[in-house]
Amino acid sequence: MAELTVRAATSEQDIDAVRTLCWAYRDYLIGFSDTLRPTIETFYPVDDYAALMDVLAQKHARPGGIILMAELDGAPVGCGMYYPLSDSDAEIKRVFVQAGARGTGAGQALSKALIDHARADGYSRVLLDTSKEFKGAQRLYERLGFQARGSYSDLPPGTEDLLVFYEFTL
């Protein structure tokens, strides 16, 4: 059985692996459905996403944020991260597990580790959103104790109804 580990992405090699996973995540989102594709292209146009990838480590830098990487037998298979929205709130972003590693518990392990790190960092709440089409992600977050809520940020017009928003009190 493969060994699953979740750890902070700290080296440049780790961050490069996470960037690769983030691009795979964007590709996954775009290919998920014809309904979701325009939303992803609105939220993550290629140039904007590339700019985000350039500053990923800074945006999620310690001590206020973190980037985690899931590995199976030492190979990167997933990622997740958060950054501060305020002194009390952190937003979880880009929780993704490659297709070949789904079903291994990597998504749950990443999500739990993000919650634990946010608590240790002194946040009182974590927030996240996911597509209404991602029923598996919704079930995972609800199993972990996240509560559905309204939007917590400004969104492009017409996109709020495509997302589900969650919060978890730490």
Image (spheres, rainbow, N blue to C red):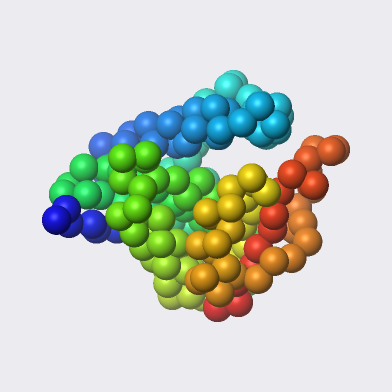
114 shown above or below 96: below
Question: Is residue 67 left or right of 130 when viewed as pictured?
Answer: left
- Quarter of image, res 34: top right
- Quarter of image, res 85: bottom right
Q: Where residue 131 appears, x then y in whole percent?
A: 64, 46
Q: Where residue 135 appears, x then y in whole percent?
A: 58, 53
Residue at image point 30% right, 55% down: 104
Q: Where residue 160 appears, x then y in whole percent?
A: 79, 47
Residue at image point 74% right, 44% down: 162
> In which quadrant will I find the N terminus?
bottom left
Residue at image point 47% right, 50% down: 95
- Quarter of image, res 170: bottom right
Residue found at the far right of this picture: 157
Residue found at the far top of this picture: 47
Total numbered circles: 0
- Please name whichever residue, 9 or 102, is drawn nearer the observer in this view of the structure: 102
Residue at image point 78% right, 40% down: 159
Q: Where residue 157 appears, x then y in whole percent?
A: 85, 38
The answer to whether residue 8 is visible is no
The answer to whether residue 113 is visible is yes
